[in-house]
Amino acid sequence: MFSYKRRSIFLSILSISLAAGLFYCIFTKPKDKPIPVEDVFSQAPWSKPLPYLPPLAGVGEVRAENCGKCHVEIYAEWKTSTHANALSDLQFQSELSKPSSPRWLCLNCHTPVANQRETLVDYLNNGDYRSPIEEPNPKFDPKMKEEAVTCAVCHVRLDENGNSYILGANGKTKPPHPVKIVPDQLRNRCLDCHNANYILDDQLVCAFNTGIELEQKENSHGKLACGSCHMRELQRKLVKPELNTPIRTSHKHSFIGGGVPKKFELYEKQIPGGYRSGLTIEPILWKKKGNDLEYSVSLKNEKAAHNIPTGDPERFLLLKISILDPEGRSLADKEIKFGQEWEWYPKAKLVADTRILPGETKVWMDLFTGIEKGYSKIVFEIYHIRLKESNAEHMRKNSEKVKSYQLRKKISEIENHYPFSSLVHKEAVDLNSGKSRIYSPEEVFRISKNRRGE
């Protein structure tokens, strides 16, 4: 009887506890609280797209195609740029397809104007980036979406009355549209995205620190803007000739970077678009010692105001040196990498950084041992690697998650559509005559156009 009473009391207490717990869950569970995106990300410029930009007086919709009706040369340059291909980029589209991808946030840099967005996010449930409150955008422009980082991203703003105007860097003409000349706003716009660094959670980390690298450079070398190198200055008419405007100082709008374009057909646009290596590379120094061969290679980051490479933390330079026999067959080769090394799991962590700092010289010294007589040539190559084969294979295996059939097919055979890397320097030395040949930029880009994979 005693044990039965104790059991009854225990069950009663348990029932009351369960009922209290259920009551708490139903009536006292914290409800979703909308938190403004600005509060969560401290008003970081990449946390939201630019506000809706209405049609521009004298132009119409603020699309690049409309700008191109007058700014013909600039429009043609932009179409070959990384900016114009920022949305169709196969690597980016593969990242967007991941279940963990914060699509709404990533798109803020790849389609940065509200006009380009099917939905808009102003609030996050409880401040959680994984729980965006997406609202349909009644002013969505599908044509403008496909333009990715379009002209308006840098050049169109709203006046105090909510009307669009052009933000310019030059003046002295009377264009058909309203314009304000504020060159400093244009110069600083790049870093709104190219300096996006933020820790979302243990694995999701934005680590684009080019702006921070520029600031470090500025401390001892003066102020430089991205356009100083990536938008080469030239004298030309800013609009088509028949409009009879004067020749003025302009800038290339190809935005050429490290020489790895988004498509194979864009290799031919790299040099006309303004590609210049930031590295000064000394010719190979070498010495024979019996069956051994000593060598050294010197690379100086003389022209870039940021680290080389910069941007995507998984980019790196691969230096390769090979010994060839008279038939051109490799007898031996060695490699070294300059870049960042990250551990992504269980928590993202930068473990090493061997990139070349502005003004820094890296010297690679080593030797080949036990090479039999008969070697005739030493070949030195530098590759700028954007996508490793191991990552590409992961993308192929997960391509079925991509909704678009065309994108899905391209990602499944990505090596045929997307350059993983570029050969950016090649030197060959005849070990018998001592004569050296350094390949021209045109030659290395022709080689790169025909390469597939890493």
Image: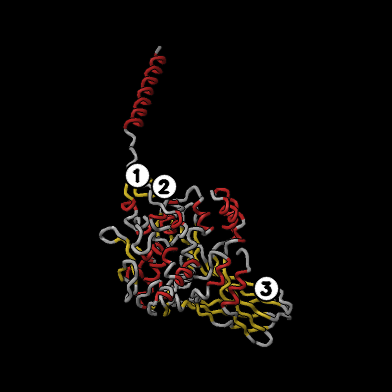
Check the image and report above or below for 16 versus 441.
above
Left or right, 204 with respect to 421, comes to left
Q: Position of residue 225 (x, y in %)?
A: 38, 73
Q: Amino acid at mark 1?
A: Asn
Q: Which residue is more in the foreground, 108 or 102?
A: 108
Q: Position of residue 407 (x, y in %)?
A: 56, 54
- Which residue is farthest top? 1
What residue does disc 3 label?
A: 332
Residues packed near mark 2 inside 10 Å, few (<14), some (14 to 19) or many (20 plus): some
Check the image and report above or below for 408 versus 16.
below
Label placed on residue 126: 1
What residue does disc 2 label?
A: 130
Check the image and report above or below for 71 versus 197.
below
- Which residue is farthest bottom? 433
Q: Amino acid at mark 2?
A: Arg
Q: Position of residue 391 (x, y in %)?
A: 56, 57
Which quadrant holds the N terminus?
top left
Q: Earlier in the sequence, mark 1 or mark 3?
A: 1
State the CA–CA distance, disc 2 to disc 1: 10 Å
Determine the residue positioned at 35% across, 61% down: 56
